[in-house]
Image (spheres, helix red, strand yellow):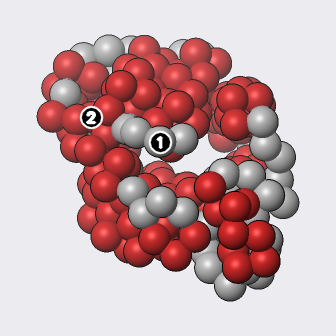
Amino acid sequence: MTADLRTLVDTVARRVVDHADELTRLDQAIGDGDHGVNMRRGLEAVLADLDAIAAKPAGDALKQVGTTLVMKVGGASGPLYGTLFSEFGKTLGPEIDATTVAAALAAAIEKVKARGKSETGQKTMLDVLVPVQAVVAAGDLARIRAVAAESAAATVPMKAIRGRASFLGERSIGHMDPGARSSQLIVEAVCDVLEGRA
């Protein structure tokens, strides 16, 4: 694992942890209110194990992040984010560039879709991840950041079809999906590291 990838994992984890209260507030509006708490627990476990994670090759390191999230994060978020990181790590080869990252993210997203039995337009994390994946190969970080923000915001007027928010029906409209927001935070953290901002 390179020093840059160590910085990447560290920055992603701290970014979500720092926004845990915001994620909890979003989830209290349309879910069971534990998204921020659960994500904080999982990513603090990742940070606690960062030295061991950093000693692994990139793909294995990402798989370890995924395994930790599955083990430490409750609710649906653990299996979904765990799948995302694990499958991303499994697909990512030794040559890492925008094209290979886009391919690995596409493969990981397909696994997340299968795990969650979900598609885009259902007010989930996929509503950020799928449009971001579509622009990753171009390598334009400003565009990736903008797509993530626009896509998270676009979940506000959506009616939830999957997840606990779907139980609210029309009342789920008017709130950002917490999974979409945590996905946006992860994408922004990655962009910050690659742009030398973190």
Would you say 45 lies left or right of 68 here? left
For label 1, the SS is loop
Would you say 178 lies left or right of 128 here? left
Q: Residue at x 19, y 28 (%)?
A: 49
Residue type at mark 2 is Val
Along the line of sight, which residue is nearer the eye, 134 or 16?
16
Return the residue at label 1.
Answer: 75
For label 2, the SS is helix
Q: Residue at x 20, y 19 (%)?
A: 52
Considering the image in quadrants, where does the C terminus appear? bottom left
Disc 2 packing (10 Å; few <14; some 14–19; many ≥20): many
Return the residue at label 2.
Answer: 46
Would you say 68 lies left or right of 102 here? left
Which quadrant of the figure has residue 10?
A: top left
Which quadrant of the figure has residue 154?
A: bottom right
Q: In the image, is residue 69 above or below residue 41?
A: above
Residue type at mark 1 is Gly
Disc 1 packing (10 Å; few <14; some 14–19; many ≥20): few
